[in-house]
Amino acid sequence: MSQVANIIAQLRNAYSDFRPAERKVVDAVLSNPSRAVHLTITELALEAGVSDATVVKFCKRLGCRGFQEFKILLAQDVAVKTQPIYGAIELDDDVETIRDKIFQASITALQDTWRVLDPKTLQTAVQILSSAGEIHFYGIWASGNVAVDAAQKFSRIGLRANAFVDYHAQITRASLLKPGDVAVGISYSGETWEIVDALQTARSAGAATIAITNYPSSPVAGAADHVLLISSQESILRGGAISSRIAQLSVIDTLFIAVALVDYGRSMQAVERTKQALAQRRSANARG
């Protein structure tokens, strides 16, 4: 497990990689990172209900040489991170409090995603997307909305991009891809079996595959050649996919702008043609 600048985000994203006893240590740290910085190894072990040896194994699995190095990295993270003042939405919250909690969750998700999003993987994704014959974006429910937004953006710069939010359409269209094409699967949990199937089908057809997910060890990540990580705690009305959607959209926007700049002339020419087509249609409708 490689270290990243944001160790708190790494603990959240790699949660499934830890053994059950080690997850108790993760839970103890994430419940109050600022306090965990000041605990001894024995105190943290007692708080987590595990042995000192388990804490040591946890640190090594995280990529640290020992407990002290882990505490140093955690202290650095706590020092630079804006600590969330607000927790989950409560039934008696007023509108102002809800506003503050929602915006804080979104800000934190963007900050954490910025830290875990690997520039090298981003660059690789930009290269294969910019030269793709056809691009598919797959998503279900809230992630489906992100897929549609992505397809619209990439289409505006002259690329053959489509979004598929229905499982049957995903599988049938993925099977028709070929080498040189790209399939992008979007799933916060990484557990969406439809997206796993779609990416596996696209990969079998010879297409390059990219996953955008919160969990690097998830099935969706495993079905992709390249994984772009987001980092979001979706504890507020999980079904609404609030902060994770914003993180996903920001990753899409980063890819879109970077791909557009690969061939700026072509991209701007395509944008102008689409603008002219829309302007002509508006003019015709106004006359009619």
Image (tube, rainbow, N blue to C red):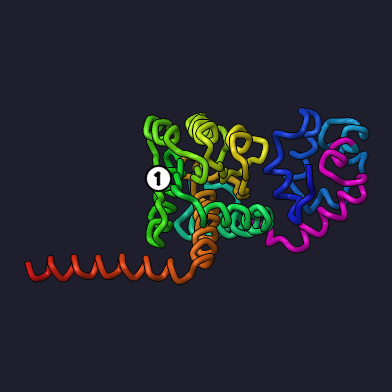
Magenta segment's dominant SS is: helix
Q: Is residue 52 visible?
A: yes
- Magenta-tinted stretch: 57-85
Classify 10 Å Cα crowding around label 1: few (below 14), some (14-19), many (20 and above): many
Residue at the spot 41% in from the left edge and 70% down from the top edge: 268
Q: Quadrant of residue 221?
A: top right
Q: Nearer the viewer, residue 287 or 83?
A: 287
Residue 21, position as x, y percentages in the image: 80, 29
Outermost left residue: 288
Please state, as top left, top right, bottom left or bottom right, where the C terminus lies in the image: bottom left
Please state, as top left, top right, bottom left or bottom right, where the N terminus lies in the image: top right
Identify residue type, mark 1.
Ala
Residue at the spot 40% in from the left edge and 36% down from the top edge: 173
Q: Nearer the viewer, residue 116 or 122?
A: 122
Whether 44 is drawn above or below 191: the answer is: below
Q: Is residue 69 left or right of residue 268?
A: right
Whether 185 is drawn above or below 191: the answer is: below
- Count of number-bearing discs: 1
Residue at the spot 65% in from the left edge and 52% down from the top edge: 121
Q: Nearer the viewer, residue 238 or 38?
A: 238
Residue 97, position as x, y percentages in the image: 51, 57
Q: Is residue 149 left or right of residue 13?
A: left
Residue 22, position as x, y percentages in the image: 80, 33
Q: Secondary structure at mark 1?
A: strand
Does 78 appear in magenta?
yes
Whether 265 is drawn above or below 22: the answer is: below
Q: Is residue 186 visible?
A: no
